[in-house]
Image (spheres, rainbow, N blue to C red):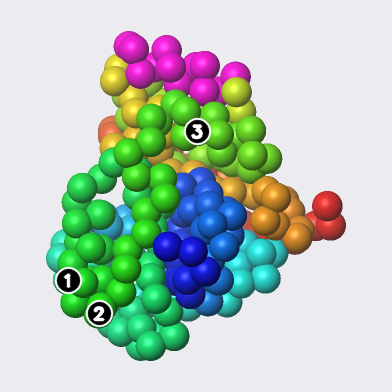
Amino acid sequence: MRDMRVAVLFSGGKDSTFAIHKSLQAGHEIKYLVTVFPKGKESFMFHWPALEITKLQAESMGLKQIVQRTEGKKEEELMDLEKVLSKIKDEIDAVVTGAVASNYQKTRVDKICQKLNLKHISPLWGMNPENLLREIISSGFNIILTGVASEGLGQDWIGKSIDENAVNQLKKLNERFGVNISFEGGEAESLVLDGPIFKKRIEITDSEKVWDSKTSSGYLEIKKVVLSSK
């Protein structure tokens, strides 16, 4: 499957960004980034923290972005995804996702693609979580966490850069608490600030950690961000 015209489902996180990188390496033409914005925080399918930053990421990569709003209700949000893909289906051959191990997400995108006569490409599917995270880091991507929701991941992980040292810490948390090292179980959400496919880096100049002690979860509220020369 080389030289295909693709739309990438893009959340701004490490997996969907790395899926763009893998798609370019495979020779695909990226026609669109498709970002689905859930109105609430309870979406079953879509990432929500820091989604507003995806506009700058798309600009930095020189890629066209399409934004689709959704109420974020289970299953109904899939209709919103299908709606936006149906509008561009004649311009693309395939949909690319950063799915790694979520059958819930992959099977639903599979069904939509089948209905629209599109291929579904998931270049990260089935990869070992630790190996995947280390490969993303070694490829030159700068990642931070924008949300955490798992035992073992405290406030100090919000806004934290994910480097090799962080991966080693996550290995210990995996052994102790069962934290998925690539956060595939919803343990955390990430944001990519820079990488080899970025023409400019994203710099957060003002932010605030928001923490809910009742649920032991929190997120990074990004108040100001700029594109800076590399």
Whether residue 160 is visible, yes or no, is: no
Q: Amino acid at mark 3?
A: Leu
| Residue at 19 percent of width and 77 percent of height | 115
Q: Amino acid at mark 2?
A: Leu
Whether residue 185 is visible, yes or no, is: yes
Q: CA gap, disc 2 to disc 1?
A: 17 Å
Q: Nearer the viewer, residue 119 or 148?
A: 119
Q: CA gap, disc 1 to disc 3?
A: 31 Å
Considering the image in quadrants, where does the N terminus appear? bottom left
| Residue position marked by numbered label 3 in the rendering | 133
Question: At numbered mark 2, what does the secondary structure look like: helix, strand or loop?
Answer: loop
Q: Amino acid at mark 1?
A: Glu
Q: Specify whether residue 226 is painted magenta.
A: no
Predominant SS along the magenta part? helix
In the rendering, at what x and y percent does residue 150 appear? Answer: 33, 30
Give the mark toward the camera: 2 or 1.
2
In the rendering, at what x and y percent does residue 181 appear? Answer: 40, 28
| Residue position marked by numbered label 2 in the rendering | 116
Q: Residue furthest right?
A: 229
Q: Residue furthest left?
A: 75
| Residue position marked by numbered label 1 in the rendering | 76
| Residue at 25 percent of width and 54 percent of height | 106
| Residue at 61 percent of width and 28 percent of height | 163
CB atoms at circles 2 and 1 under 8 Å apart?
no
Left or right, residue 62 beside residue 180: right
Highlighted magenta segment, given as a residue range: 165-176
Q: Earlier in the sequence, mark 1 or mark 3?
A: 1
